[in-house]
Amino acid sequence: MEYKISKDARIAVIGYGSWATAIVKLLEHNGESINWYVRNPEVLESLVNEGINPRYLNDVEFDRSLIFPSNDLDKVVSESEIIVLACPSAYLKTFLEPLTVSLSDKFIISAIKGIVPDDYCTIVEYIHDHYNVSFKQLGVFTGPSHAEEVSRGKLSYLTMVCTDLENAHLLGEKFASPSLHMSYSTDLYGIEYAAILKNIYALAVGMAVGLGYGENFQAVLIANAANELTRFIQESYPDQRNTMKSACLGDLLVTCYSTYSRNRRLGLLIGHGCTIKSALNEMTMVAEGYFASSCLHQINQKHQIDLPIAQMVYDVLYNHASARKKMKELTEHLI
């Protein structure tokens, strides 16, 4: 049975980090009323009383008549038809733990670019398997999108992915604006995995920069990463798709090159000689690539796809290998 979204469907956002905050701002800009699940007491109080998130994007002000922050997850979900997941993948289970109402009649959008640790599956796969939600009621909101730029109206291009293009367009209209162009796709698997893999490759680029490799090498590393990303997606789930579009290649490029990129930043710290533990402690926000590296390694035990860059990152992060030695070995395999 097809699931059709109504134009006046109420939206909820789960999460209070920078990307969740930017998403709420996008929706508010279009006049949407947003139910907002916020677990942090300090952030909740500030949003209710001042319309500001004091921890993330604290220069962004909200119209308090359009946002309805709450720490009652059941209430937020019950009063909404569309649920946007925008918390770090490592904490998804913790965020959803208080939920007692069903998600089976909701439309769930993942704005999370990560894999659920220990379950070794994407967000879409996890919600489908654990909450009895049909793939027809699942979507992905992704693309080259640093929250800092999106929230401040910098021109951005994002993609809404659903199995039904009509639903994708209806959802996209709720986010689109003069500064945010939307494109649409039905490739849930390919685009979600591309958003996960690019974080691992940004870690590799950060390591290279920290180790002193120049821009010439960075370009070669990213070009090989793009090929590796395509190879994994196509060999693990063959389909007619174009990974050169902005939702895949564009997201890879901005995450590898941008100073906003937390995954690149983590790799940079490691390349500079920080231990993994100290580098993680230096991070003020979650670097999804750290968790994704381990999960992808486990997933690829089944597929056995050649992923030299991803394997290098895994060896450094989890096998205590030398970043300098592993990067030097990798240079012999790039073309």
Image (cartoon, rainbow, N blue to C red):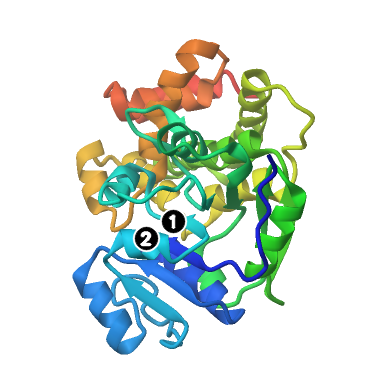
Q: Position of residue 172 (x, y in %)?
A: 68, 62
Q: Residue furthest front?
A: 1
Going 35% across and 51% down the picture, which residue do you hit?
A: 101
Residues at marks 1 and 2 touching, judged by CB atoms closer than 8 Å: yes
What element does badge 2 sit on? loop
Going 29% across and 53% down the picture, which residue do you hit?
A: 283
Circle 1 sits on which residue? 86
Say which quarter of the image contains residue 15. Answer: bottom left
Amino acid under label 1? Ala
**Relative to 42, residue 91 above or below:** above
Left or right of residue 261: residue 76? left
Quadrant position of the C terminus in the picture: top right
**Relative to 201, residue 75 above or below:** below
Examine the rendering and report whether any part of residue 328 can be seen. no
Q: Position of residue 46 (x, y in %)?
A: 27, 81
Q: Position of residue 18 (x, y in %)?
A: 41, 65
**Relative to 204, residue 262 above or below:** below
Query: Who comes first in sequence, dot 1 or dot 2?
Result: 2
Circle 2 sits on which residue? 15
Amino acid under label 2? Gly
Left or right of residue 280: residue 127? right
Q: CA distance from mark 1 to mark 2?
A: 5 Å
Examine the rendering and report whether any part of residue 38 can be seen. yes
What element does badge 1 sit on? loop
